[in-house]
Structures are given as C-alpha cells and as structure tokens.
Image (cartoon, rainbow, N blue to C red):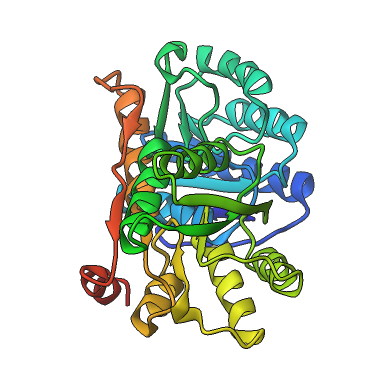
Amino acid sequence: MTRMVRIDQNKVFSLIKSSRRGWLNSLLVLFCCVLTAQAHAKFIAVSVSSQDNFRNTITESIEQAIDARNDYVYIEDVDNDFAEQVKQIRHYIDSGADAVIVFATGTKEQNKQLFEFAKEVPLVFINTEPVDDLFFMPPNTVYVGSNEVDSGTMQMEALAKMANYKGKIALLKGEMSHPAAVTRTEDVYNVTDQYPDMSVVAAEAGNWQRNQGYNIVEKWVKDQVDFDILVSNNDEMLLGGIMALHDSGKDVKSYYTGGVDGIHDALLAMQKGDVDVTVLQDGHRQGAAAVDVAYRMINKGFVVNPHWVPFKLITKDNYQTLLDNDQ
C-alpha cells in the first residue's frame, strides 16, 4: 500500500501496492519539491507493517485527519519486513518528515532499534505495542492504541455470562508474534480459569485472516471437536469460522460466538444473530489520536504515554447505533 495525498489542494496520488523503492523515491522527490514551495506545510509519514481491513481503517483515518489540516501525508506498507521498515523510516526522515507514525513490525527487541530515529523526529507508534514496557519508552516517542487486557477480558467475560459460566471453548488466535494476539489469548485463558465448568478444548492461530478462520473451524468440525463457544482474537477470523459452521450444516445459533474489532461485517452478522459479542477497537479514533499526538509532539506540546483509546463491549443490546453510524 502506498498513498500520498495533498500534493496540491486535491489528492493527486492514490497508489496501492506499487513497487516500493522506485515509486517511493520518485514520489518523495516530487513531494519534497512541493514542500519547499510551501514551507509552512507539515509532512507526516506513515510506516505500516502490513495490510488488513483494520489497519486500512486506521490509515484512512490518519489520512483524513491530516488532510483536514491541509497538510501532507505519505503512507506505505513494508510487508512485515523489519529491515525494510528501518530503511523506510530512514528515507522518510531524509525526505523531510516532521513526524513518523509507525505500525511496528519487528520483535520487541528489534523495535528498540527504531527508537534511535526519535533523536531526529517524533515517533508515534500505533496499534502494535513496540516494546513490553510502554512506560519506559524514550523521549520523543509515544504509543497510541487500546489496552489489550481490556479487549479479551471484556469479550470472554461477556461470553461466559451468556453461557451461564459453562462450556467448551474453541479459540482462533491472531498472529502470535503480534502483542495483541498474545494478550487477547491470555485474557481468554485467564477468564476461563476462573470458572471450573469452562475449558479451552481447541486453539489455533489463524493470523487475523477470515479464510484461515474458515479453514481451521472446518477442520475442527471434520475432526469432531466438541465445542459450543467460538471465540476469536478478531472479527475477521470469527466470521470465517461462522461461515465454516454454516457450510458444515451446523446451527450457528447453537454456539456462543465472539470477536474483537467491531467491524461492519461483524455488526451485520450480529444483526442476523450469528455473532453474540464483539469488542470495538475504534480504528477511526486510534488514527485521529495518532495524528493529534504527532502534531502535539511536533509543536513541543504535552503528551501522555501511552495514549489509550478505550475498547467498548458490543452486544445485541447496543450494536444498532454503531451499525447505523457505520453506514
């Protein structure tokens, strides 16, 4: 994904998945020429680990927030390549970025290397916690995201209550190198450990992808895994799993189902009665908050690290308002 906007007063470029270095170099050269002519404008660059629907929601929000300020943004992904992310951020800074928003793709140890760039420009890490202890990140760095302990705990407690604190759980996990997947998975186990009549009988990583969620649940059904609660680290995998249950001739309404993110498709599935619980991770608010924090840092204003964007539990009792606003 490569996007550059506000080269002029209109969006001139919207380039999706172009060949990275050639386009990046040529576009940033052009970009810097424009910024030279309009020296008052700010330039915020965004380094995205990889594309998925939720990250795209965040980057669209970032783009809109910067566009509303009549400033400039460049957005590109690195296909989960940490070495590429290092090169990319270096190139952003050399090209005059006033701040860089980063979806970190490395391990916790690797990500510490990125902190060196904060000696030159503000770094706003978003959505993926770059290190274990956010409170000890160095100066000129801030993390913007949602506290993952809340997400999985809200999700599993709601499902446990619906199931009267009894049941066999099948768990779809995200990318296990991703801190959110690790924490949400731990949350599920921490909640179920409190209730003697609940247990996790199957768990597998579906890497956030709907098609992988489908394949895993299809295999569980074929293997006759006995479960009555399907819980997923995100909505995409959950929707794939629900589709597999449908295609296998199962009555989805006989299962308790829950995901995380509150995406539009999950709300539609909740409307049909297929999804019982999701937890809204507000990508729009995360993106807008990251931009606000970036400008505060550019202007030497006060910021708090970490900057939390709260999760919200979504059930059949409150989903309609969110769905109406999501049209």
- Quadrant in which the N terminus appears: bottom right
Can you say whether 118 is above or below 209 in the image?
Answer: above
- Quadrant in which the C terminus appears: bottom left
Q: Is residue 42 left or right of residue 169?
A: left
Q: Position of residue 221 (x, y in %)?
A: 69, 73
Q: Position of residue 273 (x, y in %)?
A: 38, 81
Can you say whether 278 is above or below 224 in the image?
Answer: above
What's the residue at 72%, 29% (across, down)? 87
- Return the residue nearer the eye: 206 or 106: 206
Query: Can see residue 148?
Result: yes
Q: Position of residue 184 (x, y in %)?
A: 49, 43
- Return the residue nearer the eye: 284 or 224: 224
What's the residue at 68%, 21% (across, down)? 110
Can you say whether 164 is above or below 28 in the image?
Answer: below
Using the rendered view, name the quadrant where residue 307 is placed.
Answer: top left
Q: Is residue 113 left or right of residue 188?
A: right
Q: Position of residue 243 (x, y in %)?
A: 59, 79
> How many discs appear?
0
Query: Can see residue 6?
Result: no
What's the residue at 69%, 45% (across, down)? 24
What's the residue at 75%, 74% (across, down)? 222
> Residue placed farthest to the front in the image?
196
- Return the residue nearer the eye: 173 or 200: 200
